[in-house]
Amino acid sequence: MKMPTDNLNFYRAFEDRHRGSRELIKSRLQVYIPLVLPLLDIYKECKTLDLGCGRGEWLELLTDNGFQAFGVDLDSGMLAACDERGLQVSKKDAITALRELPDESQSIVSGFHIAEHLPFDVLSILVQEALRVLKPGGLLILETPNPENIQVATMNFYLDPTHQRPIPPQLLTFMAEFYGFSRVKVLRLQEPKELYENRGIHLIDVIGGVSPDYAVIAQKRASSEILTLFSEYFNRDVGISLDALAGSFEQRLSVIEVNAQQAVLQSEQARALAIASASHAESAEARAIESVSHAENAEARAIEAELHAERAAKRSIEAELYAERAQSSAVEAESHSEQSVARAIEAESRAHQAEINANLAWDHYGMIANSRSWRVTYPLRLAGKAARWFVHGSIAWITFSPASRPRRILRTFLIFMKRKVKENYKLKSFAVRVLARFPTLKERLMRVGEASFYTRENKGSSLEDMTLNHLNSNAKRIYVDLKVAIQKNKEGH
């Protein structure tokens, strides 16, 4: 496409800004050198034509490697850059330059980023003319932006105002095959080298990581000996396609999904362990409660033994008094008959036996009070007393103590919190699960704020309904049974 005369240097400045430096472009074009070098062994004279030669990077590489390189371009600014380096160039359009050449006169016809500037019919003529002027085994090289790269196809391609439309690799390949080239190879180029490293493929890589350029290498029909020299290059895959990159991304997603499933499984296992730990804790709590119960039973038996000892002591005192009375009676009745003396002796014997029993009871009490189990269970007895005082004493103090101001405030707060818990389903479920472990505390808290039947919920209800509404299930059942029994008793009379 010919640029306006007042912008002759525009495209050269544009290439300098957006395509890259000469050194960068030459380094990229090095990939083609191993492909074209066998032509020097086939033909003594290797003439080449570069269409749209631009600043001459490819011409310079061909010349350095022994080819007779010639280039054509319509941009004067570009041709000036070639003239500065002594390269053979001419201001001419591509089709004219090809038509002026004789048949089978060129080893290479190349065009780097020229195809996307041409209308389709002109591009078709270019491919046909290139086939005509190439020697057997000669190469047509057409490099163009790769529309497989989503970022190139949707944005970067349109950065150049002279571009016509993106050309899919399949279209350019088919065109070369259709017009008679023996074999065609697609090279994908300039992809980020980081994608070859062992790392995960991300979505941004799928969007912009596919090779941004590709080249179609078309070879003219020749003998098998000539074609064999190029087989290694034509059989080698170069670059990254969209299908390959998308497949790697899907594979990474599969790995992520597997890792997520493993994480969920580990989370469930941790949850199961936590539940098992909670169960162990509940078992330990049950054993502790059982130990407290045993301690309370031991305390009760000790109290009972103490009472027995007190009763025995009392009986011993009574026996001593009786003995004293008997002795007094015996002294007073010294003159009585032998029968009275025998009764006195018998009474003294019973008193002695009672004293022995009392001493045995005291000894038994001392053994219990001084035993090791009595001393070991002393902290548990204290804990049991404290627990009974806390559960029965403090809750009763909150519920039934006199209506002092602090207690009224606390009672009002408990009633408020109870209503809030009932209004919130999740909070109510949590409170029910917690209070299920403390039935006595649950029963006490249920009665807080419900001692009076005349609440807003019971307003307008009968006394019997309000009574039943404030009873638990067991109390309701007992109430109904009593009511039925009273009714039957009345009917029987």
Image (cartoon, grey):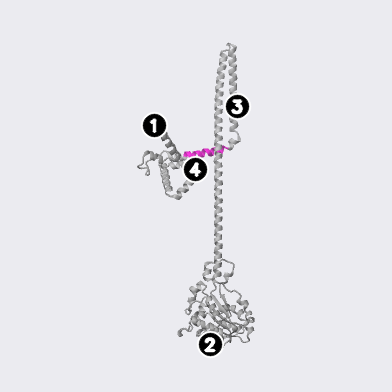
The image position of residue 180, as x and y in percent, is 56, 81
Give the residue pinned by disc 2.
Answer: 99
First in sequence: mark 2 or mark 1? 2
Give the residue pinned by disc 1.
Answer: 491
Look at the numbered disc 2 and give the secondary structure of its residue.
helix
Determine if residue 118 is in view.
Answer: no
Q: Tell me where the magenta segment starts and ends, as one range.
A: 377-393
The residue that appears at 57% across and 15% down in the rendered structure is: 330
The image position of residue 56, as x and y in percent, is 55, 83
Q: Give the spatial CA distance, label 1 vs label 4.
A: 43 Å
Give the residue pinned by disc 4.
Answer: 438
The answer to whether the residues at label 1 and label 4 have Cβ atoms under 8 Å apart is: no
Report whether 464 appears left or right of 255.
left
Up the image or down, 159 lies above or below 400; here it is below
First in sequence: mark 2 or mark 3? 2
Magenta-span inclusion, residue 391: yes
Given this view, does label 3 or label 4 mark the residue nearer the observer? 4
Residue 253: quadrant of the picture: bottom right
The residue type indicated by label 4 comes to: Phe
Give the residue pinned by disc 3.
Answer: 360
Q: Give the spatial CA distance, label 2 vs label 3.
A: 139 Å
